[in-house]
Amino acid sequence: MATLAWLAMLSLFAGPTVAAEFPSIELETTSSDTLDGVLRAALNAPELERAAEGGDAKGWQPFVEAERHRLEELIRGQGYLHARVEMPDAADDAGTSDKVTLKPVTGPIFRVGMVEVDGLQDVATDTVRDDVSRQMMEAVGKPARGDLLATLEDEVLWRLRTASYPFVRVTERELLPIPGRALATVRIVVEPGASARFGAVAYSGLVGLRQDELGRLQPFRQGDPYNPDVLERFREALLGHPSVKAVRLRLPEAVDADGQLQLRAEIEEDQLRAEDVAGNYRTGLVAAVSAIAALAIRQVSVASLRPGRSRWPLWFEVVPVLLLTAAVYLIAQRMLLLAFPG
């Protein structure tokens, strides 16, 4: 029993002791306060926290080494293309070190010297190629950051899609430092895919709406060049219909033999709920009963009018008529909506 008690006490202290031996990670500052803030925020990685909680003090090197490489890529993504993060040799005091200091060495920040977009030779018109080239040249002189590269990719894709290439994609991207200068070449390789024109639109999910009614909302005709802006206007027009609750426009995976996109519009109609129907019926019945009661009171009262007065005040004549009109309208409306939902 004494041995078991001793082992239990030892287990209570062994866990915290080993976990405490996992080294703390510190970062040296750089010449950029903004970059330091980014690095400090990024250093709180879940991988390191899980490793520290696991208490694997003898095997901390792989976790820290992976974090070092991740921070290097992060710094390079900020435009410091020659950046590196230095760390003490993992073999030195690997089991006893209580602190590891990572030293970022940034080097110069690179700027865009030129932009190359390959793959445009398959694009049909010089106008499209010139439009892309002009947009790419606006990036020259800006820091060669990863977010700039992503923005340039989006610009290329959008311009080719609006030029009727819906299946364009980026197959390669890279930042290439220009030797001897703090400049970089941005290289983007695209595959335009097939040029496309609008085809027919097939509707699904229709209950009360008619296809020809929705077809009048199309801002394009079959055979017009494909344009995502026009397609978005069509989606907004469908959503503007009072009986349409949701719309999803689906493109096919490829053009057909005639170079057309056969679109599919999935419509969700704004159906009338049963409780709404019952509520409107109750409102109509109340209006009808009120009108009938008013007419009955009028008929009884007309006979008792004093001599010289042959009619009620005008407002008392109008009220029963309005109540009857409202009752007929509400009941007829609910019946029509039940017969033709949407």
Image (cartoon, rainbow, N blue to C red):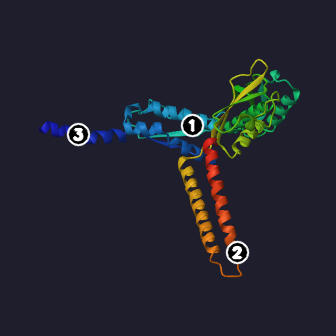
Mark sitting earlier along the chain (1/3): 3
Residue lying at 63% horizontally and 34% vertically, measured from the top left: 205
Mark in front: 1 vs 2: 2
Mark sitting earlier along the chain (1/2): 1
- Estimate the spatial distance between the alpha carbons at disc 3 and disc 2, rounded to whole Å: 106 Å
Residue 46, image x and y in percent?
47, 39
The one of 324 and 125 positioned closer to us in this rendering: 324
Residue 174, image x and y in percent?
69, 28
Disc 2 designates what residue? Answer: 311
Q: Is residue 218 above or below residue 286?
A: above
Amino acid at circle 1: Leu
Disc 3 designates what residue? Answer: 10
Residue lying at 84% horizontally and 35% vertically, measured from the top left: 134
**Residue 79 seen:** no
Q: Are marks 1 and 3 in contact (CB under 8 Å)?
A: no
Q: Is residue 73 above or below residue 286?
A: above
The one of 144 and 150 positioned closer to us in this rendering: 150
